[in-house]
Image: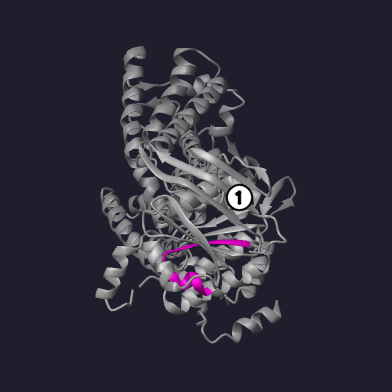
Amino acid sequence: MSDLADALASDERIKQTSALRKALIRPELGGICGTVIVFVLFAIFAGDSGMFNSQGILNWSIVSAQFMIIAVGACLLMIAGEFDLSVGSMIGFAGMMIAIFSITLGWPVWQAILITFALCIAIGALNGIIVVRTGLPSFIVTLAFLFILRGFTIYLPQLIERKTIIGGIDKAAEGDWLAVVFGGKILGGLFTWLGDAGIIAVFERGNRAGQPVVDGIPMLIVWALALVAFGHFVLTRTKFGNWIFASGGDAQAARYVGVPVNRVKILMFMFTAFCACVFATCQVMEFGSAGADRGLLKEFEAIIAVVIGGALLTGGYGSVIGAALGALIFGVVQQGLFFANVESSLFRVFLGVILLFAVVLNTYIRRMITGER
Amino acid sequence: MKPEHAPLIEMKNIEKHFGSVIALNGVSLEIYPGECHCLLGDNGAGKSTFIKTMSGVHKPTRGEILFEGKPMHFEDPRDAITAGIATVYQDLAMIPLMSVSRNFFMGNEPEKKFGPFKLFDHAYANEITMQEMRKMGINLRGPDQAVGTLSGGERQTVAIARAVHFGAKVLILDEPTSALGVRQTANVLATIDKVRKDGIAVVFITHNVRHALAVGDRFTVLNRGKTLGTAQRGQITPDELQDLMAGGQEMVALESSLGGTV
């Protein structure tokens, strides 16, 4: 490669780019900066409020993990050039389906979960097929599903159980092998050891005295990290990842060189639905109930996390790691405001401001990449 | 024409109708290896329809396509690419946000095994991309440079290099020079010349007579869905070509009023 470097150095037409500029045109830049800023701010203003002890960390980690799960799906879909506005409704719908199957119909919980996953992924595929076949903007098609799914989520439990919240799933799920995959915890032994060693807090009174307050890592967080790793791997290291970029960058150009653009897009809609379903299942297992209003506005929060993470709304550019950092910023700020005793409605103000900031930054970065002026 | 070679593609009496519109009305053409065949014609003459028929986008309503002597039926562009017919479209050749190396291997990604997974072989892709780009006289900052930073001419060159690398026998270039400046046009024409000398047949679509004459071996003029004939290099003057393209008489009148500069 050294002769190559010489050949390049000898060409006077090529401006050498500084390392700084190279670092700047990474999609994750905004996410990395944002994460650092957010942690520094809360370390200063809420450092002694318990935000950074074991419970505090678990608290914002869970919220961040929730955002991450749906952000991964939304990120890959956005890079492939499409949106899914039905994510929030899908979360409500999936949770309600698990409840209806397992409580009303009395199926085993694992069966309810598997059927729900199949149903949601099929709806995701339907979203994708309609978008691809009609050529309509995915914005409109998935907006329709936002209402259709939410409508069913409210109507079905009222029709069947005469209420909008179905509970008792935690009891039904006891001892279920698949429910544990979504609602269980891992590394319990490690946390017991940490508690015994005095590194993390333990209960001082009551029937759990001596046990650590945080007794394991919830599967929700494991799912989030696994999905981020999977998404990042597929996007950057595989042939399919190149197809995702190509489909969103310029679908026609990609088709001309033989990229199966329609298949890529439909698969990404299915993956987004899968992520929404993981979110819903973890939530249902955690709460032990399904509610008709679950997942409201989640589609927008997912999109905002993805945009903060450096993805372009127009597709063809972005990063799963960035989206995960966007989700982390979300979780930390949402919970941090609580720890810092700030009115929680200000979180929405923060969302709006950071979204605007991120989009402006992304537009600037894109100009740098493509050399537009 | 090189009589020692058999034609690579023969298009015989191709007709293409879109509903009641007859876009092509019996066009015949042979393309030989190593020649640059210029397809000229004014807007609406049927050039685009014709090359789309050749590259598998459209199926001809009537007529026959022989590829290496055998009748061919392309179901979609992928079939044509597999057979060795590559098309480089003017605006749709490259994806600006993606790196040169990712663009170069788009749709033909090299893979290596990594345990149970198949990975995109970035190291190989980067190396080949840099190598091919140097052959074409483009010095990249690096294989991860975004295509958006390249000039229009360089993008066309990358697309041509890509087609050649993946074994194209026929390269169809759809108005590659129409949006380019003088210098970039010269670069693309030089690339065409280089590719032709490697024995690849080039079909060069243009409506610029001077660009055609600079590299063309043979010239076919299309007008209103028909061939007005094929001429060899040296048998035709630029003025004659220009007149053929514009459909004769009116152009002569127009040109004289503009002082013969068109």
In the image, residue B61 lies at what x, y percent? 48, 38
Residue B56: x %, y % from top left? 54, 45
Question: In this picture, is A209 found above or below B166?
Answer: above
In the rendered structure, the answer to whether residue A147 lies left or right of residue B125 reads left
Figure quadrant of the C terminus of chain A? bottom left
Residue A223 belongs to the span the image colors magenta:
no
Residue type at mark 1: give it: Glu
Rendered-image quadrant of the N terminus of chain A: bottom right
Let me know if residue B204 is in the magenta part. Answer: yes
Range shown magenta: B201-214
> Which one is nearer the viewer's eye here, A45 or B94?
B94
Residue at 60 percent across and 53 percent down: it is B85
Q: Is residue B113 visible?
A: yes
Give the secondary structure at mark 1: strand
Instruction: Give whichever of A51, A235 is nearer the camera.
Output: A235
Tell me: residue A257, above or below residue B37: above
Residue carrying label 1? B10
The subunit letter for the residue under badge 1 reads B
Count of numbered labels shown in the rendering: 1
Q: Position of residue A163 (x, y in %)?
A: 32, 18
> Are there few (<14), some (14-19), or many (20+) residues within 10 Å of tag 1?
many
**Residue placed most toward the observer, A331 or B7:** B7
| Type of colouring | one colour
**Residue B246 at x, y percent in the picture:** 36, 62
Q: Is residue B148 left or right of residue B262?
A: right
Q: Residue B180 lies in what quarter of the image? A: bottom left
| Residue located 49% across and 28% down the image | A122
